[in-house]
Amino acid sequence: MDLHFVDLFLNPKVYAFFGAVIAFALAALGSSKACGAAGQAAAGVITEEPSRFTQTMILQALPATQAIYGFVIASMILGKISGVETLENGLALLAVGVPIGVVGYVSAIWQGKVANAGINLVAKRPEALFNGVIYALMVEMSAILGLVVSILMLNQI
């Protein structure tokens, strides 16, 4: 077996980097998928009613927050990497990325579906924007909890 592979496998910083990757990549993938789907619905609405651009853009942008949360946790993990000396700490930082990565991915997709429904609502009833935003923000709570759990875990390392 190649000694360099074993060194890489036992390097705690590699696991910490994977934690940052999980936190950001999963959350950002969910956000981009959700924003893309909501953007398609928004484009359809403004084809008929260009004046509803701002309303539909607000709803379309909501699922982007999960990518921001993933970025925050990834940055926090990367800020701790220089002090990682043990495999235990590296694995702990890997685990820190999981709550916001996984919950961020799933909640972004569901929030995108709710935002899409809100965009359809605004297409028929422009005065109902606030209702659509509230529905989408209910899904946001899961992402916020994933962020808080990751932060709480990080503070224990």
Image (cartoon, rainbow, N blue to C red):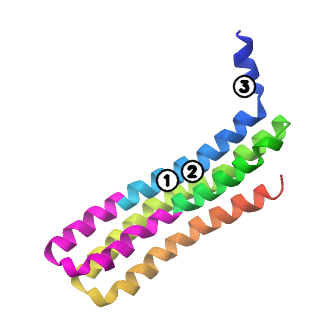
Q: Main secondary structure of the magenta part?
A: helix
Q: Position of residue 38 (x, y in %)?
A: 33, 65
Q: Considering only order in the chain, which callout, 1 or 3, is on the residue closer to the N terminus?
A: 3
* Whole-number angstrom distance, CA of label 3 to CA of label 1: 26 Å
**Label 1 amino acid?**
Ala
Residue range (magenta) = 36-65
x and y percentages locating residue 117 in the rendered image: 32, 72
Disc 1 target residue: 28
Q: Is residue 21 left or right of residue 1?
A: left
Left or right of 55: which side holds 11?
Answer: right
Q: Is residue 137 magenta?
A: no
Question: Which is nearer the N-term, disc 2 or disc 3?
Answer: 3
Tell me which amino acid carries mark 2. Answer: Phe
Which amino acid is tagged 3?
Answer: Phe
Q: Secondary structure at mark 1?
A: helix
> Residue reaching furthest left?
48
User: Which mark is drawn over residue 24?
Assistant: 2
| Residue 50 screen position, x and y as percent | 19, 77
